[in-house]
Each structure stands twice: as C-alpha cells, then as structure tokens.
Amino acid sequence: MRSVITGTGIGIPKNLVPNEALTPLMDTTDEWIRTRSGIEQRYYADPGQGSAELGSIAAESALQSAGLPKEDIDAVIFATMTPDYLFPGNGPVLQERMKLPEIPTFDIRQQCSGFLYGLDLADSLIQSRKYRNILLIGAEVHTPFMPWENGWDTTIGLSTRAITAEEREINTRYRDRLVLFGDGAGAVVVQARDDGQSGFLSSRLFTNGSNIEALYVKGVGFRQRPYVDGKQLEDRDSIPRMEGREVFKQAVSRMPQAVRQVCADRGVTPADLDILLIHQANLRIVEAVAKQLALPPEKVPHNIERYANTTAGTLPILYHECLSDGRIQPGMLVCFTALGSGLHWGAVLYRV
Ligand code: UT7
C-alpha cells in the first residue's frame, strides 16, 4: 500500500505588501531585501484572521481537488507555530470551522519543517493501516509578531496615521526578521492507494536542540511565572530572536545532506530528481542548496519572491503552484526538504 497526495490547495490573505510598504516603518530598502533574501512582496492577514482560517481555506480547496467528501476524512494534521490560541491547537478550531466529523486532529509544530514532519506523519499513520484519508495543513499568520502599532496603516491601508521616529527606531531593531515573513497556508490530502506507482519513497527527519537560541521566541513560555507578564512584553520577548548567519549556515549544509540520504535510501542520486522543493526562507539558501546538489534552476522552483517565508505554509504552497502550472507532472520524482527552528530538518522523497 502507498500513501499518495491526491489533492492540494492554498489559502493566501488578500493584503499584498510590497517591500516598499515596509520602508516607512523601519530603516530598510527594497534593494536590501531583494538582494539579501530574494523577497519582493508578501501577503498579510486581515486583523482577526488567524492561521486556522487560512488553513481551512486551503483545506477546503485541497478536499475539492481530491474529490474527497468531508465525511471521509479519517484524521487531520495541522502544522503551525502560530496557532489561534496557546491551547487548544488549531485542530479543533479547524474541525469546527469546516464542520468536520468528530475525527482525531493532531497539532504539530516544528516551525519551518512542520509540513515536512506532517508528510512523514501522514504517511506513517496510513502505513499503520489505522487511517486511509488524511488532511494535512501547514499555515501561519506571522503578522502578530510585528512590533509596530501604526504599521498596519502603511502596509494594508487601514488609515494614514504617521509612523513616529520612536516607533521606526524600535522596528529597525528587528528589521532582519520583520522583512522576511509573510502569512499563508497550504494543504494536501494524503490517501491510501493499493495500486499505481505514486507514493512516498523515503523520509529522513532530524532534530538538534543544542542551539535553540539560534531561532526562538524567548518570552511567553511556561518556564516563567506567570507565563506572560508586562516585563516580557516591555522587553519584546514575544518577537522571535534569530542568529541569521548561523541558521543560514545550518540550512545550506543540513538540507543537502538530508536530500542525499533519502536519494541513497532508494538507490538514486540527486541528479535523478525531477524537482527539488526547498523550504522558502531565503532565495540565497535555495540557490546554495541547488548548487551543492548540482541541480539546474529549472529543477528547483521558488516562490519566495511573492510570498516571503510562510514557515509551515511554504512547501505545500510551492507544491500546489508547481502542480497547477504543470512544472510537476505525474510520474516525476520529487524531493521536499526544509530546515527551521529547533533545529528540525529533513527530506522526503516522493513519486508523483
Ligand atoms: O525559516 C526560518 C529560518 N530562517 C532562515 O533561514 C534565515 C537565515 N538567514 C538569513 O536569511 C540571513 O542571514 C538574513 C536575511 C536574515 C540576513 O542576511 P545577511 O546577509 O546574513 O545579513 P547580516 O545579518 O549579516 O546583516 C548585514 C547588514 C547588517 O548591517 P551592518 O552591521 O553590516 O551595518 C544589518 O544590520 O544588514 C543589516 N540589516 C538590514 N539592513 C537593511 C539587517 N536587516 C536589514 C534590513 N534592511 N531589513
């Protein structure tokens, strides 16, 4: 028996935010953002629009493309690091929003590797023969991380209040992260199939917690009493901290290793891949990984220029787009790879 991706969908918020819209908010330029990250624009959710909502839009369209009625879903896996509530996770929120049957919902995190972990979990649950039809979602709303108060006026046109010099100075402290993220969701349906060639071939997942501080949110955690207080907010401990160069270095070494391993598991080499889908955190990372694996640009699609980094959303959005425009065709050998906070990373090999 094989686990096969039978449907895909995406949920993108309506507010398009080009790099230029960020320049009044902090000391940055369109040129810096493009050159250092490849990002040209991103989308921001509306106020009050959470990752469960974006995820449910993606999920509805994935179910439609799979032709799977809601009553036939056996389980949901929701990957996000930006859930609507601290608890419960987005599973029950999605279940109610989509009026799904009372099926189990698994909430997983793993940040930028969330969808990759979700693929392996979906395949494993199907191979256990307990479930046949799984709905897997990767969705994020990063905008609540943004420190500005008046920035929404500039970015999504809510009004025309001016940014104060003090606010601009505060935003500039976090500019290396603020320019990198966008909101968005992708979903896939994974189903058991007893015939055909399509399906998951190999997966390798890894965790190394020796340097959690390389990318983490320090505040609002249960090691602190109370878990959130005025001091943490004053210190802006709710904004992610990132050692950008360290994460970059890990990404460009760990992802190629994982890709080589899943290929070796099946007796192929990276040159045999038709498409490599790399987590979209920085175009320079994507290009460096492709170069190490000696893959030509046409085999390594990217969409970071349009969406920025949507964390657990990036791989399903990219997969959906490549299927929709024909870059991914039935029979192709596809590899997914990601690295993110944790660190968590890995690769999944899949025959379309
Ligand atoms: O998906 C989650 C995983 N995250 C990642 O994979 C991120 C990995 N890291 C990166 O993508 C890159 O390290 C960044 C895009 C975050 C930063 O690029 P970089 O080339 O490593 O720049 P840098 O941090 O070395 O900073 C270079 C300069 C600094 O100024 P000085 O010290 O040279 O004067 C920064 O202050 O660029 C400055 N800078 C900015 N300037 C304008 C940092 N952010 C900005 C900005 N606009 N937004």
Image: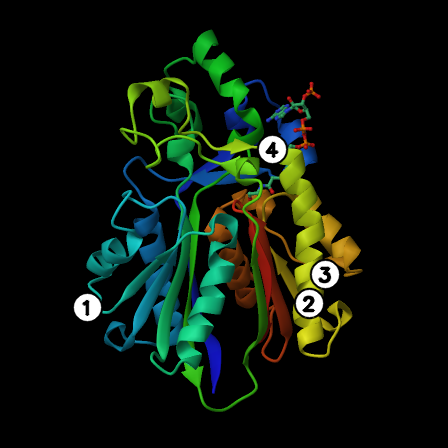
Residue 244 x/y as whole percent: 62, 34
How would you rate the neighbour count of disc 4 (Cα within 10 Å): few for under 14, some for 14-19, many for 20 or more?
A: few
The residue identified by callout 4 is 243
Q: Are marks 1 and 2 in contact (CB under 8 Å)?
A: no
Numbered tag placed on residue 261 in the rendering: 2
As helix, strand or loop, the secondary structure at mark 4 comes to loop
Q: Quadrant of the C terminus?
A: bottom right
Q: Nearer the viewer, mark 1 or mark 3?
A: 1
How would you rate the neighbour count of disc 1 (Cα within 10 Å): few for under 14, some for 14-19, many for 20 or more?
A: few
Q: Residue at x 54, y 46 (%)?
A: 209
Q: Nearer the viewer, mark 2 or mark 3?
A: 2
The residue identified by callout 3 is 298
Q: Nearer the viewer, mark 1 or mark 2?
A: 2
What's under tag 2, amino acid-wise?
Gln
Q: Earlier in the sequence, mark 2 or mark 4?
A: 4
Q: Are marks 3 and 4 in contact (CB under 8 Å)?
A: no
The residue identified by callout 1 is 102
Residue 102 x/y as whole percent: 19, 68
Q: Residue at x 43, y 70 (%)?
A: 122
Q: Earlier in the sequence, mark 1 or mark 4?
A: 1
Q: Earlier in the sequence, mark 3 or mark 4?
A: 4
Residue 155 x/y as whole percent: 44, 28
Q: Earlier in the sequence, mark 1 or mark 3?
A: 1
